[in-house]
Amino acid sequence: MKKLDRYGYLFIAPFWVVFLTFSIYPVLLTLYYSFTNYTGSPGEEVVGFANYARLLTDTYFIEAFFNTIKIWGINFVLQIGVALLLALIFSDLRLKLKGLSFFRSFFYLPNLITISSVALLFGILLDWQHGSLNMVLMKIGLISDPINWLAEPVTAQLSVSLILTWMWFGHSFIIVMAGVSGISTDYFEAAHIDGANRWQMFTKVTLPLLKPILLYIMITSLIGGLQLFDLPMLITDGIGSPDGSLNTMVLYLYNQAFKYNNYGYASAVAYGLFLITLIFSAIVFKGMFRNERTAQKKGA
Amino acid sequence: MRKLVSLLTVGALSVGVLSGCSDSEGGASESKDDVLKVWSFTDELKEPIKTYEEKNGVKVELTIVPIADYPTKLKPALESGVGAPDVFTGEIAFLKQWVDAGYWENLSDEPYSVDEIADNYVPYVFDLGKDKDGNVRALSWQTTPGGVYYKRSLAKEVLGTDDPTEIGDMMSSMDGVFEVAEKMKQKGYKMFPDEGSIRWFSQGANPEAWVNDKNELVLTEDKINYMDYAKELREKQYTALAPEWSPSWFEGMDKPIKVKENGKETETQVFSYVLPTWGLHSVLKENAKDTAGDWAVTSGPSPYFWGGTWLGVYKDSKNKEAAYDFVKLMTQDEEFLTDWAQETGDVLAFNPVTDKIKDDFSEEFLGGQNNYEFFLDEADEITPGIVTKYDQQLDTLYGASVLQYVEGKKSKEEALEEFKKQAKNAYPDIVVD
C-alpha cells in the first residue's frame, strides 16, 4: 500500500514541478514586484503600498477599466444575441434546417484567424480614405463624407466590439447549440400541443433550461474580455488611441511594463486586474447560485 | 513478436536519446572555444559574417530575433549570462537604455581605446554609442540622416526646376515648405502623404533633448509650433491623408491616389516623402517601380536622422577578442566597408572609407544624383547629444496628442496638457511643469 502511495506522488510530480515553476513562482514574484519600484534591472527598492495607492487614483487605469467593460459588454450582448438567434433557427422543429455541422464550422472560422491578421484586415477595411467600408457606404449614398472609424473614440470602440463579435459568435453558437440539443424534445412538443408560439417556447422553455450554459459562456467570456489586449493593441498605435478610448487594462499593463519599464507599477496593475476579475466572477457565480436556490424553493 | 517490436522501439528511442546527448555536449564545448555568438534583429549581418568567417577562421552563430521581441528576449540573457551572445546589435530605440545599463564592454578602455579613432566617425553617430559617463559602449558602421525625396517631374511642372539644391533652398524654412505646398495644391497635387511627415522637422533650428540634465521634460517652442504646422497642413489640404505605413501611403509613391475631401473624391499625386537613407533602399525602391529614376533627394528645413544600428561586445563574453574582431570588421575595416558600401549603398559613418568613395556615387533611382555625398553633408549637420532613452515613447505620445489637435478633438492647450499628463504617467521620475 505504502509503495503505491509514493508512486502516486511520482506521477503527479511533473505537473507540480511545471505548475510551481511556471505559474506559482511568477505569480508570487509579481506580487513581490508590485511592492517595489523594479524597472527591469536588478537593484529595486521596496516601496510598500505606493504602487497600489497610485493605482487607486490613476485616471488612466480607471479609464482603461471602463473602456474594457464597454468594449466587452457590447460585444457580449451582440455575440449572445446572434448565437441565440441562430440556435433558435437551427433548433426549430418546424424549419428542419439542414447542414448544421457545416454552418457550425463555418461560423467558427473567424476564430481561427490569427489576431494580427484580423487587425490588419480590418485596419484596411476601415481605412478612412481608402477603406472598402467607406467606399460602399458612399456609393450607396448613406454618407457623403468618409467616416474616420478608428479616429473617433465611439466608433473605434464600437468597431473593436463588432470585430470581437464576428470572431466569437461562432464559438458561443456551438456551445448554445450543444445546450439546446440537450433539451428533451418532449418539452417542445408538449408546449406545441399546449398552443405555445415560437416566442413563448423560446422564452418559457429554451431560455430557462439554457441558463447554466449561458452563465458558463458569460463567465468564460468575461474573464477573457477583461484581458482584452491584442486587437486594441494592433488596430491603432498601441497606446490606446484615439484619445485613450482603446486603452484596455491589459494594454495599459503591457505599456507600463514593457514600454515604460515601470515593472513595479505594472505588477500592481496586474494584481488590480486580478482582483477585478475575482470580484466580477464572484458576482456572476453568486447570481447563478441564488437563481438555483429560488428555483428550488419554487419547485418545492 | 510483440517483444521484438517493443525491444526495437526501446532501442530506437535510446539511440535517439543518446545521440541527442552527445550532440548537445559537443555543441556546448564548441561554443565556448571557437563559435562566436551574434544576436541581431535583421539579417543584415549575414554577409559580413561570411567575410568574417573566411578571414578569421572562426565560426559564427547568428541569432535573429524580430525587433518587437528583441529587447524582451535579449535582456534576460544579458542579465543572467545564460546563452548570452558575444556580440549584439542595438537599435536607436533602445540604444540609450542599453549603453547606460552596462551590457556592452567599455570600448574606451584598453585594449580597445576607440576614443583614439573618434575622428574617423560622423560625430553624432560616435556620440550616441557613449554611456552617461562618456565611455564608448557601442559603435556603428552607418549613418542615417534624412532628407526629403520628391518626384522630379512634378517639381519641374510646378516649381520650374528639378534641381535638388534649388528645391532644398525653397524648403529651407517651414514657411518655404508651405509656399511649395500651396503651389502644389494649385496644380492639384499634394505636398506630403500625411501631417506626420513633418514631425522630423519639429525640432527646428535649436534642437533640445526631450529630457534635460535636471530630469525635466523640455517642450521647446519649435516643438509646440509643430502642432500648428501639422494642423495647417491638414486644414489647407496639403496632404493626401495617407498615414505612414498604410497601404495608400505606399501606393502614393508609384501612382495617383484618391482623396475624399469635402464630400467629393479627387485623384491626386503625392509630391514628396520625408525619409532617411534607408528609406531609399527598403521603402522607395521596393514600392516605386514605375516612377524609378523620377526621384531626387534634398534637405528639409532642419537636419534630422531616423534609425540606426549599433553593435558592441557583451561585457561577460568569454570570447572578447574574437568578438571585438567582428566589431572591428563591421566598423573599421576599410576593405570590407568599401565593398559593403558599394554593394548595398548603405551610407557609412566611417570617414576613411566615405572620403574615398563618396565622389563616385550616382544613384539611378534618383536620376543619377549623388545621394551619398548629400547624406554625408546632412549627417555633419546633426546635433549630437540630444537622444535620450525616453525618445521613442515620448515621440509616440506626443504624436498622438498632436493628432488630437489636428483632428480638432482637442484645443492646443488641452492636447499639450494631455501629453504632459501622459509623459508623467509613463515616466513618474521626470519633472513635468
Image (cartoon, coloured by chain):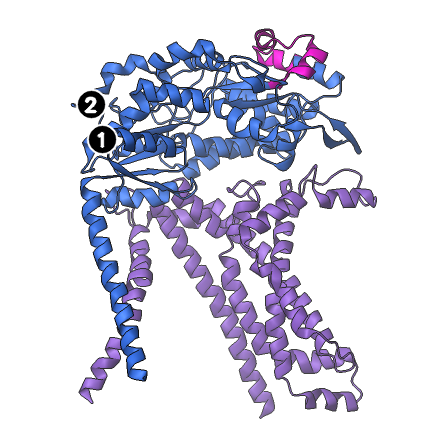
Chain colours: A purple, B blue
Residue B18 position, x and y percent, is: 22, 63
Q: Tell me the subunit letter for badge 2.
A: B
- The answer to whether residue A237 is left or right of residue B85 is right
Which one is nearer the viewer's eye here, B315 or A269? B315
Q: Can you say which quadrant of the picture contains the N terminus of chain A? A: bottom left
Residue A163: mark: none
Residue span colored magenta: B150-179
Residue A37 visible in the shown view: no
From the image, tell me which residue sits under label 1. B105
Which one is nearer the viewer's eye here, B298 or A212? B298
Q: Is residue A1 above or below residue B170?
A: below
Residue B220 position, x and y percent, is: 47, 20
Amino acid residing under circle 1: Glu
Residue B400 position, x and y percent, is: 55, 34
From the image, tell me which residue sits under label 2. B112
Give the mark nearest the N terminus, 2 or 1. 1
Q: Is residue B130 above or below residue A48?
A: above
Residue B169 among magenta residues:
yes
Q: Are marks 2 and 1 in contact (CB under 8 Å)?
A: yes
Which one is nearer the viewer's eye here, B86 or B46? B46
Task: Specify the quadrant of the image occupied by residue A257.
Answer: top left
Identify the residue at horizontal 37%, vertical 18% (top origin).
B338
Task: Specify the quadrant of the image occupied by residue A258.
Answer: top left
**Circle 2: element type:** loop
Identify the residue at horizontal 31%, vertical 35% (top origin).
B88
